[in-house]
Image (cartoon, coloured by chain):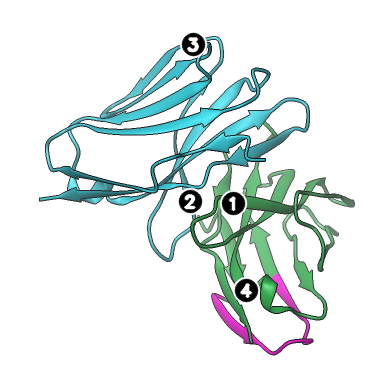
Chain colours: A green, B cyan
Amino acid sequence: NAGVTQTPKFRILKIGQSMTLQCTQDMNHNYMYWYRQDPGMGLKLIYYSVGAGITDKGEVPNGYNVSRSTTEDFPLRLELAAPSQTSVYFCASARDRREKLFFGSGTQLSVL
Amino acid sequence: DQQVKQNSPSLSVQEGRISILNCDYTNSMFDYFLWYKKYPAEGPTFLISISSIKDKNEDGRFTVFLNKSAKHLSLHIVPSQPGDSAVYFCAVFSGNTGKLIFGQGTTLQVKP
């Protein structure tokens, strides 16, 4: 049972480059989330989705985009990477909005 | 303006003793509270939750207490074990926004 799978685990980007963080879940969850965690800080919500075709902004959406074409996949796109986007990114899914979140193992991203 | 605060960045306890992790929140409308545990290089995993209609919930060595009048949440681990060494995040569910808000985390170290 894979749960939530994120790729890649590590990535180094140069300023101005773009990349997509992949997230897929095999639990048929409707709700999916992208969080970022900065040192000494809690998890900040970037974007979320309540089902295929529906996405919405979280607390810190600037510089990111998402899409949700299937129930399973919720990729996060970084356009024009900036040093402020250096962080650990977590994807999560849940059966419903009040249900516990299942997290992926994270992507450590450095923008230099 | 942090709506959820974990004021102790770190806590160190001896194996076999009690660990108490604390969390304060600002909005009395929050009605569902969760604790997550995170090991290095892994995503957070759900530990225990409590609804606002209760003041205590127990699961094995883990007990969560809720003091609504003080807007305070605590996690007790008894007895503490070295394998409990991790970062613990409290999270509150906002019915208004439908999202989870995370605290900054407390790093627990349990010494053998």
Residue linked to disc 3: B54
Q: What is the x, y in percent for residue B42? A: 44, 61
User: Helix or strand or loop: what does disc 4 sit on?
Assistant: loop
In the rendered structure, the answer to whether residue A46 lies left or right of residue B87 reads right
Question: Magenta stretch: residue B5 in it?
Answer: no
Amino acid type, callout 4: Thr
Query: In the picture shown, does residue B103 fall above or below A105?
Result: above
* Cα distance between the residues tagged 3 and 1: 26 Å
Q: Which residue is mark 2?
A: B44
Spatial CA span between label 2 and label 3: 24 Å
Q: Chain of mark 1?
A: A
Q: Secondary structure at mark 1?
A: strand
Q: Which residues are magenta?
A: A9-21
For the residues beneath circles 2 and 3, the answer to whether they share a chain is yes
> Foreground residue, B72 or A107?
B72
Q: Residue at x 13, y 43 (%)?
A: B14
- In this rendering, would A30 be left or right of B78? right
Examine the rendered structure and indicate whether residue B41 appears above or below residue B88. Answer: below
- Say which residue label 4 marks: A86
The residue labelled by disc 1 is A43
Q: Are marks 4 and 2 in contact (CB under 8 Å)?
A: no
In the image, is A90 to the left or to the right of B11? right
Instruction: Please state which amino acid type lies under the numbered disc 2.
Output: Pro
Residue at 68% x, 72% y: name it. A84
